Amino acid sequence: EKKNIKNIWVKLRFSSVKIENEDLIMLIMEDVTKEVILEENAIKNEKKYKSLFMNMDSYFIYFEGIFDENGNPISSVIDTVNDSFQKVIGLSREEIIGKSIDDIFYLDSDFLVGNRDKIYRELGQGKSVDIDDFYIKSLKKWCDIALYSPEPGKIALLINDVDEKKKINMELIKARDQ
């Protein structure tokens, strides 16, 4: 009878033991094929998603919120940005990482400042916050903004450029009203 032979990954452990005054070497062999395959797949997926993240058109900023002793937001430190964000603000990754988001990219809005506590509270409850048709003066663009918190104190900010769409809609409204 022919057996199906496949490649397997094994972990080997050697140990010396003494049995009835005789020194022996004990070999323990463990099949770790599943773990190796899972790790290889995780690495492939990480590369795939990192490439997607770095090359997407949307601007992405991942930062850590800094809070006072009462839990009120006072600042932030940028952990990661994608290439699109770097290009739109014209700074290198080294000039961005570790800096406050306000130092690098000011959203210049009374709306965000006035609602910061509410936004952080919703993020803290596991909710995402979406802000549509938001004009960012520093970019001179209309954008849609999505914020979410994948872990406590960490915030992901995704900005989609909707400037062309917004301008076309404003032109259509203007033409309709004339």
Image (tube, grey):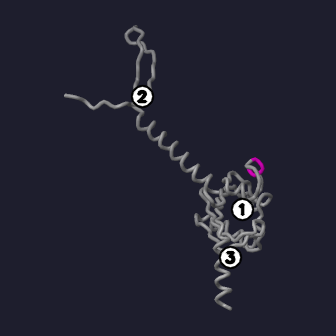
User: Could you tell me the amino acid type at mark 1?
Assistant: Gly
User: Could you tell me the amino acid type at mark 2?
Assistant: Val
Residue at 65% across, 85% down: 173
**Residues drawn in magenta:** 94-98
Q: Do the CB atoms of the residues marked 1 and 3 lie less than 8 Å apart?
A: no
Image coordinates for residue 74, horizontal then vertical, percent = 77, 61
120 sits left or right of 47 in the view: right
Residue denoted by label 2: 10
Between the residue at mark 2 and the residue at mark 1, the CA separation in whole angstroms equals 49 Å
Q: Residues within 10 Å of mark 1 (few under 14, many from 20)?
A: few
Image coordinates for residue 133, horizontal then vertical, percent = 66, 74
Image coordinates for residue 107, horizontal then vertical, percent = 75, 66
Q: Quadrant of the N terminus?
A: top left
Q: Residues within 10 Å of mark 3 (few under 14, many from 20)?
A: few
96 sits left or right of 151 in the view: right
Image coordinates for residue 115, horizontal then vertical, percent = 71, 72
Considering only order in the chain, which callout, 3 or 2, is on the residue closer to the N terminus? 2
Q: Residues within 10 Å of mark 2 (few under 14, many from 20)?
A: few
Considering only order in the chain, which callout, 1 or 2, is on the residue closer to the N terminus? 2
Q: Main secondary structure of the magenta part?
A: helix
Residue 167: assigned label: 3
Residue denoted by label 1: 71
